Amino acid sequence: MPDMEPLISVVIPVYNEEKRIMRAIRSMQDQTYKNVEIIVVDDHSTDNTASVVQEIAAQDPHVQYHLYPHTAEQRTNWRGYDINAGYAARNYGFMLAKGEWITTQDADDASLLNRIEVEYS
């Protein structure tokens, strides 16, 4: 029996991307490298992002939906700008990852279908 390819975790932090998150997830589901777990961490979206991701996760065991458990961290600077920029949700996804390797995907992007294979090689 040939050696199984190692599990690669793909972490996708998301906030209010209901219109684009499906494309990002699909581009990971359709990869030529198949041994992936897709970890979507929702940073408390106020649109229908959670519903979209949960529907996909219900159909595909490779896809996981997680709601980022907010803490009392400061999210804005003195000007009121969001300084989180998804790093907290991304880091939470890293903690959940079970893969030997970890990569990230932006919620508003799509990847070429051989991206993971090329990165792994």
Image (cartoon, grey):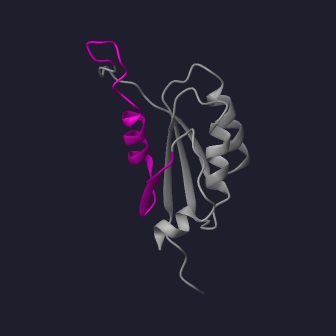
Q: Determine whether 91 is above or below 19 in the image.
A: below
Instruction: Name which quarter of the figure residue 47 lies in.
Output: top right
Image point (30%, 22%), residue name: 73
Q: Residue at image x 31%, y 19%?
A: 72
Q: Relative to the observer, which residue lies in front, 71 or 121?
A: 121
Residue 80 covered by magenta stretch:
yes
Residue 92 position, x and y percent, is: 40, 40
In this view, 91 is above or below 26: above
Say which of 98 and 74 sits in front: 74
Numbered-mark total: 0
Q: For residue 88, say whether it is visible.
A: yes
Quarter holding residue 31 = bottom right
Outermost residue toward the bottom?
A: 1
Residue at far left of view: 78
Looking at the picture, how far across and down is residue 76, in whole percent?
A: 32, 18
Residue 37 rendering spot, x and y as whole percentages? 55, 55
- Write down the quadrant of residue 34 in the picture: bottom right
Q: Is residue 61 visible?
A: no
Residue 104 on the magenta segment = yes
Closest to the observer: 10 or 106?
A: 106
At x 62%, y 38%, the residue is 21
In the foreground, 54 or 118? 118
Report the residue at 47% width, 69% height from top: 120
Specify start and end residues of the magenta stretch as a single range: 76-105
- Which quadrant of the figure contains the N terminus? bottom right
Q: Is residue 112 left or right of residue 119?
A: right
In the rendered image of this protein, does residue 48 appear above or below residue 63?
Answer: above
Percent x, y of residue 48? 66, 24
- 10 vs 30, left or right, is left
